[in-house]
Amino acid sequence: MTKHDTWVKLKPGNPYEPVLDLFPYGLPMRDPFPLERVTVNREQVALWIIDLERLIPPQANALAQLIASRRGVHVTEVMEEAVFQGGFAMTDGWVEAMECGAEGFQRSKEVADFFETAPQPPSARAWREFYNSQHDRWIEGDEQPPPINSIDDIDPRLRTPELEQHWKMRQVEQAIAAGGYSVFDVLSGRATVDVLNQIDPNNEWSLVRDDDDFEDDEIYE
């Protein structure tokens, strides 16, 4: 089975707030998008699956007790259901932010490809074929995603300004570690500025000192 690598933060007012202190890094998700579908009152509802495999016992127990209390069922029933489906189902609409690794980016690319190529709106048959492929390869199988070594390895449709900034700073950290800079250069910021000017030549980076004389509308990067 593939090791899943998606984490999400939830919007304020979500039904999981009573136990979120147990999840300082967010909730681990089996899929990087709501893959599961159920029909409620003749309407199709999309579901995320909180990844049971990556939960420690206190987290799993807290979620099971919370869900059981809200549904008015015994906690054993909730746990059995979670074991069967690989995690706890969560209704779509509560996710505020998501972080993922190579698997999450690859599967996000696949769902983007699906919606670009499938009939619009996607037919039930088309979705079922996509769903089965995801389960066979990523959930039941052991599909391995291509590695991500730079922002260029991430599909352009999935890139955000925050993601690009993250990869830029990661590149800076790697260059500083390999650059032989002194402790003073690192602490003063000189190493960071030097590396930024190397990897981002389109912008001129410099240190701003307390005695620098500049206008209010002058921008320093």
Image: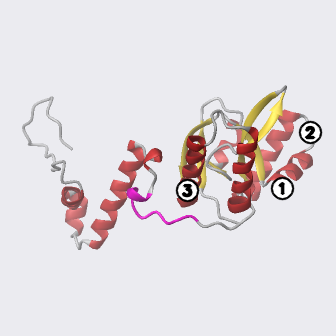
Q: In which quarter of the image is residue 169?
A: bottom left
* Mark 2–mark 1 distance (CA, rounded to whole Å): 16 Å
- List the single residue furthest toward the left: 213
Q: x, y percentage for residue 201?
A: 18, 54
Is 199 or 124 nearer to us in this picture? 124
C-alpha span from label 3 to label 1: 25 Å
Q: In the rendered structure, which amino acid carries the disc numbered 1?
A: Val
Which numbered tag is attached to residue 106?
Answer: 3
Q: Is mark 2 on a helix, strand or loop?
A: loop
Considering the image in quadrants, where does the N terminus appear?
bottom right
> Image point 80% across, 40% down: which residue?
66
Tag 3: amino acid: Gln
Determine which residue is flagged by label 1.
83
**Relative horizontal placement of residue 114, taking residue 132 as reference (left or right):** left
| Lower position in the chain sequence, tag 2 or tag 1 | 2
**Front residue of this view, candidates 121 and 198:** 121
Label 3 secondary element:
helix
Neighbours of disc 2 within 10 Å: few (<14), some (14-19), many (20+): few
Q: Residue at x 69, y 50 (%)?
A: 130
Say what amino acid the circle numbered 2 marks.
Val
Mark 3 is surrounded, within 10 Å at the Cα level, by few (under 14), some (14 to 19) or many (20 or more) other residues, namely many
Q: How is the image coloured?
A: secondary structure
Q: Is mark 1 on a helix, strand or loop?
A: helix
Mark number displayed over residue 37: none
In the displayed structure image, the side of residue 61 where residue 218 appears, left or right: left
Q: From the viewer's perspective, is residue 130 above or below residue 217?
A: below
Q: Label 3 to label 2, Cα distance in Å?
A: 37 Å
Task: Indicate which disc, 3 or 1, sits on the residue closer to the N terminus.
Answer: 1
The region drawn magenta spans 145-153
Q: Position of residue 140 (x, y in %)?
A: 75, 62
Task: List the residue tagged with mark 2.
Answer: 73
Q: In which quarter of the image is residue 217?
A: top left
